[in-house]
Amino acid sequence: QVQLVESGGGVVQPGRSLRLSCAASGFTFNTYGMHWVRQAPDKGLEWVAVISYDGSNKYYADSVKGRFTISRDNSKNTLYLQMNSLRAEDTAVYYCAKDSTIVVVPAAILEYWGQGTLVTVSS
Amino acid sequence: DIQMTQSPSSLSASVGDRVSITCRASQSISSFLNWYQQRPGKAPKLLISAASNLQSGVPSRFSGNGSGTDVTLTITSLQAEDFATYYCQQSYRTPFTFGPGTKVDIK
């Protein structure tokens, strides 16, 4: 069955960097787009970024554009989120999610989700 | 960016009730609208895609309809496990925005 396991969260000071990983299994990773979605404490869901199956297309939320980079290593079945210049407002649980369709541009139907990893930005 | 709103923001209901949640987009999104359920402390779960396509394994008491700017999620005969927060999300264009959520709790 599909499994998505995030890691790399923790406490980090404002302005510093952190890299999240999402290990995928149970499906053919290199044929699906992948997303990152975050949820601040007691708040709603915020879509963060998406990457196409081959890494050729990437899109970001305005709130993270220029600071965060989504990438993937299909040889390792792993999705990444490099987060730079972190701010207090980036504090959230970060989820990775699998897109539902095999197309060049992801359909943005988030079919499976990991359990999330908590990132806390605080001095 | 496409803004998503949901109404109501919360509701109280009893087991067996029929409830409806409306999601409104700031511009037409055709049927590019998905619904997710999130129970406390858990990851979201996809319920319905493309406004009305029920995902495999999701009970038939869940249904969705609508297109354009207004889409509705309906739960007929609410069950105990349905008390959760429901989010809509547009997949029409990036950024793929979510609605603010509707919390369904026990009356």
Image (cartoon, rainbow, N blue to C red):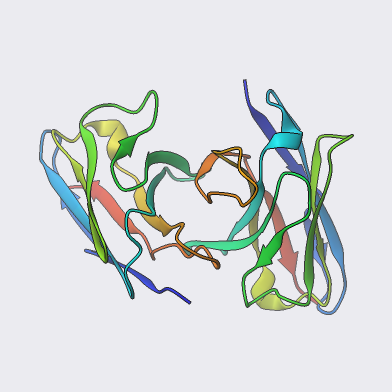
Placement of A107 over or under B59, stated as above or below = below
| Quarter-of-image position of residue A68 | bottom right
Placement of B54 over or under A92, stated as above or below = above
Residue at 85% across, 62% down: A18
| Quarter-of-image position of residue B17 | top left
Placement of A34 over or under B53, stated as above or below = below
Residue A45 screen position, x and y as percent: 50, 60
Residue at 17% across, 50% down: B20
Q: Nearer the viewer, residue A46 or B31?
A: B31
Residue B66 screen position, x and y as percent: 21, 53
Residue B10 screen position, x and y as percent: 25, 60
Residue at 33% across, 53% down: B31
- Relative side of B96 to A75, left or right: left
Residue at 50% across, 46% down: A109
List the single residue furthest toward the front: A104
Residue A15 screen position, x and y as percent: 84, 79
- Relative side of B66 to A80, left or right: left
